[in-house]
Image (cartoon, helix red, strand yellow):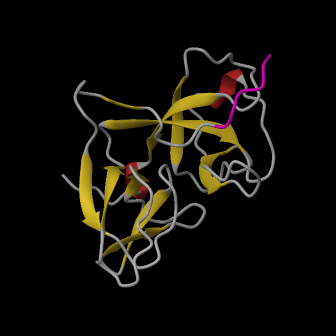
């Protein structure tokens, strides 16, 4: 059993079709400072920061926010939360590490941004009520009982802004 580094959500992405991930370049809201790997939503027609377990997820930031002064002054690339996109994400909690279990795969979890470094979005192992993601497969170089193991996840389509 090893302790793995917390991975930024979306550091690795794969698709069901083997091609590039479904990505769109969209207008961002003012002061979007969040980093690549942040879960984002539509906020008044612009890409904005999400809170824990957002009702409708647009996707994952493919780049850092521009921190502009007005809505729509910049665009941001977003990996869309679409059934064809699988994202890598760490199983952890907002302020604590988590040991994975064999039952992690197939269990529905919420998502949360960590409050302790690194401040990345993770699969919230403390939340099996606000179902937003499901780990589908463990990262091949992480053991089933590692602390902070990473998994390939799918976003629940019921909580996604599906753009097709």
Viewer-proximal residue, 61 or 106?
A: 61
Residue closest to the far left? 164
- Image-based side of 123 in relation to 44, left or right: right
- At which x and y percent is residue 8? 56, 42
User: What secondary structure is the stretch in magenta mostly built from?
Assistant: loop
Viewer-proximal residue, 30 or 146?
A: 30
Residue 2 in magenta stretch? yes
Q: Quadrant of the N terminus?
A: top right
Q: Residue at x 59, y 52 (%)?
A: 111
Q: Is residue 43 above or below residue 138?
A: below
Which quadrant of the figure has residue 66? bottom left
Q: Is residue 11 above or below residue 18?
A: below
- At which x and y percent is residue 18? 25, 24
- At which x and y percent is residue 62? 38, 49
Which quadrant of the figure has residue 57? bottom left
Residue 34 in magenta stretch? no
Residue closest to the far bottom? 70
Q: Which residues are magenta?
A: 1-6
Q: Residue at x 57, y 60 (%)?
A: 53
Total marks in image: 0
Q: Is residue 23 above or below residue 142?
A: below
Q: Residue at x 72, y 28 (%)?
A: 100
Q: Residue at x 49, y 49 (%)?
A: 37
- At which x and y percent is residue 70? 36, 85
- Image-based side of 69 in relation to 109, left or right: left
- Image-based side of 77 in relation to 51, left or right: left
């Amino acid at each position: 059993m090893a302790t793995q580094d917390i991975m930024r959500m979306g550091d690795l992405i794969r698709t069901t079709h083997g091609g590039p991930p479904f990505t769109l370049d969209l207008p961002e809201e003012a002061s979007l400072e969040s980093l690549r790997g942040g879960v984002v939503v539509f906020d008044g027609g612009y890409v904005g920061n999400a809170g824990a377990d957002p009702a409708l997820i647009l996707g994952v930031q493919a780049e850092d926010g521009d921190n502009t002064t007005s809505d729509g002054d910049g665009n941001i690339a977003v990996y869309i939360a679409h059934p064809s996109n699988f994202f890598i994400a760490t199983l952890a909690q907002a302020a604590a590490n988590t040991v994975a279990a064999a039952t992690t795969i197939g269990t529905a979890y919420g998502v949360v941004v960590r409050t302790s470094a690194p401040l990345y979005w993770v699969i919230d192992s403390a939340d099996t009520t606000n179902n937003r993601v499901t780990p589908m497969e463990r990262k091949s170089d992480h053991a089933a009982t590692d602390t902070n193991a990473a998994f390939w996840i799918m976003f629940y389509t019921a909580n996604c802004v599906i753009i097709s």
